[in-house]
């Protein structure tokens, strides 16, 4: 049984006396070594407080995992396994024998020296001015300000214009045509940077986010980056269900490379590109859009529901590219607070996922996508319903499962509509730098 409300704590382990004190509610704890996220743990009230010995043992465990996943002599960064998790063999003996390796943790936490002047940050928004104001406040507070911040207003009534006008240096683009992919493409066309990052209006980015995005994209052979997305609050049953029962938006604290091997291993049953990250925290080299095209405007919120991000990652991997998940590029996300809002989100997620499967199958003739749509997902529905009844998952789990099933049906229907085969919504090229067909102003 998952508690309906959790407290979130961020604990710095590099200090002299780290502490996880007693707490009346369950704790979701993010452990840090300066600006480096080391790991995430959850604790019930009866497991608290943690004494100094427990914290010392945890620090050693998390440090060893970070070094194994990052240090080149141990093969880092980690490669993605078939389920998207990092493949790590922690060399405890080698770490114990060479005390100098422990100092590497401090070096791993050093600030990035990579310039961010070539980074354009795009925030797409629709009728959420309060959330946008919070997001922009975190962006303008960056330790290393990006070369460009663009807000793409996807509302008809220009509801983001007043908020954007209050923030110096932020460029405003009005894109009234509905759809997140449409808005993202408008932002790309208005951008000038060689690096392009995206976040959402319900997100707050860490103060080092732009620097870590630029550092991650400096890695050889990497054309795309995703990062860690932490919950901002876990105060309602809907937020807790999304985080703990549905996995939230990821929780790995070590870097992971998603490349051709991962794609080949998962492709026969539908490449699991949704495991790469979240569109709320992603970035690309501009050259990638020149090579494989922009976001598919048939997908995403306002169209199919979602998965415009994962479909782009699919094209990247199918073309021989690689994506790096780098948790140092960290943001916090405000999960849906109300149960009805979560249910709508779940339906949209599944509808978009199924729609993207058909896009990928048609574009590449990879029929593992069809097997996932008609074999894996129906099997998932049956198994999940059985476990919910057997284990006492209760009405909430069955409600969410019903919404996933409805989303699956909607995805099938969306993919067979006549307009689906109109290629006008499929990926186009980026066009001239700084060009946009939408109305914009600095």
Image (cartoon, helix red, strand yellow):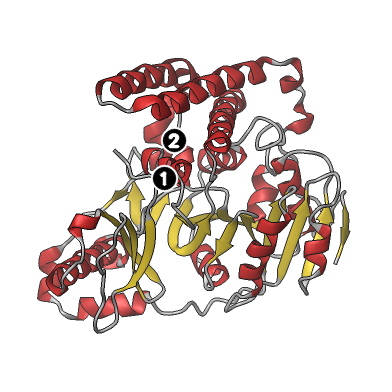
The location of residue 4, given as percent across then percent down, is: 38, 45
In space, the residues marked 1 and 2 are separated at their CA atoms by 24 Å
State the image quarter where residue 354 is shown.
top right
The location of residue 156, given as percent across then percent down, is: 85, 44
Q: Quadrant of the N terminus?
A: top left
Residue 272 is tagged as 2
Instruction: Please report the residue visible at 24 percent of the width from the left and 56 percent of the height from the top.
Output: 45
The location of residue 52, given as percent across then percent down, is: 16, 74
The one of 222 and 17 positioned closer to us in this rendering:
17
Secondary structure beneath label 2: loop
Is residue 148 among what the camera can see?
yes
Q: Mark 1 points at which residue?
A: 240
Quick check: 348 left or right of 438?
A: left
Instruction: Please report the residue visible at 86 percent of the width from the left and 47 percent of the height from the top.
Output: 157
Is residue 434 among what the camera can see?
no
Report crowding for label 2: few under 14, some 14 to 19, many 20 or more residues within 10 A (C-alpha). some
Label 1 vs label 2, nearer the camera? 1
């Amino acid at each position: 049984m998952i508690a309906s409300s959790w407290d979130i704590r961020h604990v710095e382990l590099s200090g002299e006396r780290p502490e996880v004190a007693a707490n009346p509610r369950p704790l979701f704890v993010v452990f840090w070594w300066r600006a480096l996220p080391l790991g995430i743990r959850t604790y019930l009230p009866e497991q608290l407080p943690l004494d100094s010995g427990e914290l010392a043992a945890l620090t050693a465990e998390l440090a060893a995992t970070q070094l194994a996943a990052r240090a080149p002599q141990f093969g880092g960064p980690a490669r993605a396994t078939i389920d998207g998790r990092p493949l790590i063999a922690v060399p405890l003996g080698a770490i114990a024998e060479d005390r100098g390796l422990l100092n590497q943790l401090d070096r791993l936490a050093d600030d990035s020296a990579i310039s961010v002047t070539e980074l354009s940050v795009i925030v797409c928004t629709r009728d959420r001015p309060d959330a946008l104001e919070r997001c922009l406040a975190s962006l303008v507070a960056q330790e290393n300000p990006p070369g460009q911040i663009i807000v793409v207003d996807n509302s008809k009534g220009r509801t983001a214009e007043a908020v954007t006008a209050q923030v110096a240096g932020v460029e405003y683009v009005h894109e009234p045509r509905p759809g997140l992919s449409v808005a993202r493409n408008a932002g790309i066309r208005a951008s000038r940077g060689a690096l392009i990052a995206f976040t959402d209006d319900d997100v707050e980015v860490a103060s080092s986010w732009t620097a870590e995005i630029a550092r991650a994209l400096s890695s050889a052979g990497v054309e795309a980056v995703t990062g860690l997305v932490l919950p901002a609050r876990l105060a309602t049953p809907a937020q807790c269900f999304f985080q703990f029962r549905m996995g939230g938006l990821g929780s790995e604290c070590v870097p992971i490379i998603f490349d051709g091997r991962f794609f080949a291993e998962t492709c026969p049953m539908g490449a699991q590109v949704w495991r790469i990250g979240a569109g709320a925290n992603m970035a690309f080299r501009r050259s990638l859009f020149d090579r494989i095209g922009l976001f598919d405007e048939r997908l995403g919120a306002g169209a199919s529901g979602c998965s415009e991000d994962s479909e782009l990652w699919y094209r990247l991997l199918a073309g021989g590219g690689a994506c790096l998940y780098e948790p140092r590029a960290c943001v916090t996300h405000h999960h849906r607070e109300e149960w009805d809002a979560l249910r709508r989100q779940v339906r949209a997620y599944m509808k978009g996922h199924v729609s993207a499967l058909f896009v990928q199958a048609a574009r590449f003739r990879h029929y593992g996508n069809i097997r996932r749509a008609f074999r894996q997902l129906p099997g998932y529905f049956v198994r999940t319903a059985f476990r919910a009844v057997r284990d006492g998952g209760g009405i909430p789990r069955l409600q969410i499962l019903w919404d996933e099933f409805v989303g699956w049906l909607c995805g099938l229907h969306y993919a067979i509509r006549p307009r689906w085969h109109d290629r006008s919504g499929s990926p186009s090229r980026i066009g001239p730098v700084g060009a946009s067909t939408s109305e914009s102003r600095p």
